[in-house]
Amino acid sequence: MAESTESKHFVLFPFMAPGHFIPFLSLAKLLTSQGLTVSFLTTTASAPKLQSQALGSSIRIVPLSLPPIPGLPPGCESTDVLPHTEGKLLFISSHNLSQPFEDWLEQVMAETSQKPACIISDVFLPWTAQSASKFGILRVVFHTTGAMAASLLQFLFTNPVSEIISDRQIIEIRDLCINVDLKRSELPQMLRSEMFFSPHPVLPALQQGYGLGKESCAATLVNTFDELEAEYMKYLEESTGKPAWGVASPLHKPQQGIDNDSECIRWLDTQNENSVLYISFGSQGFLSEGQINALARGIAASNQPFIWTIKDPVGGQVNSCNFLPEGFIESTRDRGMLIHGWVPQLLILSHPSTAFFMTHCGWNSTLESISAGVPMLVWPMAFDQFVNAKLVIEELRLGLQKSGGFDDIPSSDVVENTVKGAMKAEIGNDRSQQALKFKESINEASCKLSIKAFVSYILSLGLDEDK
């Protein structure tokens, strides 16, 4: 007989970034649906926003006090309130949460007279392995990237990468069941840089995170669909010797509400089916003046309908709309919509008028696009986005690449021709059919089965420890 989950306590601890909070919250909701007690740990500054996002669930948001970090203003405890150049300070200094975390664990165990069943921690928080070991609690690693990115990064960060990469333009990754050739341009930027081969402040923490994720975890969870990246899920199991589950939940179009009546949705209602290009670079993807100018000129010349959401960089007084070419808004007003700030992205992607998504290929945006059955034009900017782009274009055949790199400025002609090419029937239809195929292959039942199997496995390990 399966053990009851009643009163079983799972602790979730994400890295302090919106792209990590989102999949951790989704996982927390799946776990509470299994009758588990779930504590979601974060910093004091991030707790109120996460509490509002967890409304309607039984997730317990636990704020921990982050000691001051030299070089960061007080209260800057998440990457979305920091310039992209300063996010590494938060990453490097996250271990300052270890003492507040352990103090909280001691308090919980004193109050309940039992240990949590497990700690599910971000691969970016390697120091949680020591805390879990100190209290004899099982630790599970959660990769908020996809399985391909998790596999390749684990391989690179747990092997002598300077020898693997060296000055090669093609990096051959051969290990167990994976056989991948990466162009140097498809590596995360820090691995292409000469800085990597000299002391780099981020490198030791990444090596520790992926190393501990490989060697000292009870199981591995990945923010993906098993149907999407089966080969890489198999690799993670084989390389760690522990089970791995994809626990991404299919993203559904939101129910009728205020967002459904937003101006951009009303505008989409007036457009032809499969005619609109949606452009967004995520919550922290900010384009430079040259990039915005080139992108705008290419979009204008393409004559394609579009929705483009532009966000301003954090930590400055820059209005990114000022970088648009003179006359752009007026000349495209009859076929385009420019939005300065937030948009209901999943509603836009789910709308029948949306044909393609121009994206930075952040993993959450990629999963939303796949869930909605929308193919992509990709412009990866940083870290895992280059690997995600390779997966989307070459392995899944769900997209085309327009550009790549945080500093890359494509010519307006490249933008124009790529957009026109995507909208052509022979290319657009092929990618759209692929996108719909993957949309239909993922289902909620599979995700729920994975969660049930994971919970059963963890509880069985707990029973073994009790004997």
Image (cartoon, rainbow, N blue to C red):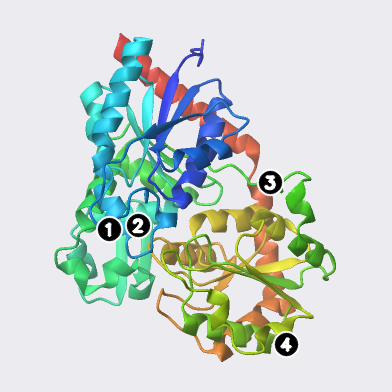
Q: Secondary structure at mark 4?
A: helix
- Taking 8 as reference, is 23 above or below it? below
The answer to whether mark 2 and mark 1 are in CB contact below 8 A is yes
Look at label 3 and name its amino acid. Answer: His
* Point 51% across, 12% down: residue: 4
Mark found first going from the N terminus, 4 or 3: 3
Look at label 2 and name its amino acid. Answer: Leu
Q: CA distance from mark 3 to mark 1?
A: 34 Å
Q: Nearer the viewer, residue 350 or 373?
A: 350
Give the residue pinned by disc 1. 156
The answer to whether mark 1 and mark 4 are in CB contact below 8 A is no
Q: Nearer the viewer, residue 137 or 397?
A: 137
Give the residue pinned by disc 4. 331
Q: CA distance from mark 4 to mark 3?
A: 35 Å
Mark found first going from the N terminus, 3 or 1: 1
Drawn side of residue 39 relative to residue 256, left or right: left
Give the residue pinned by disc 3. 252
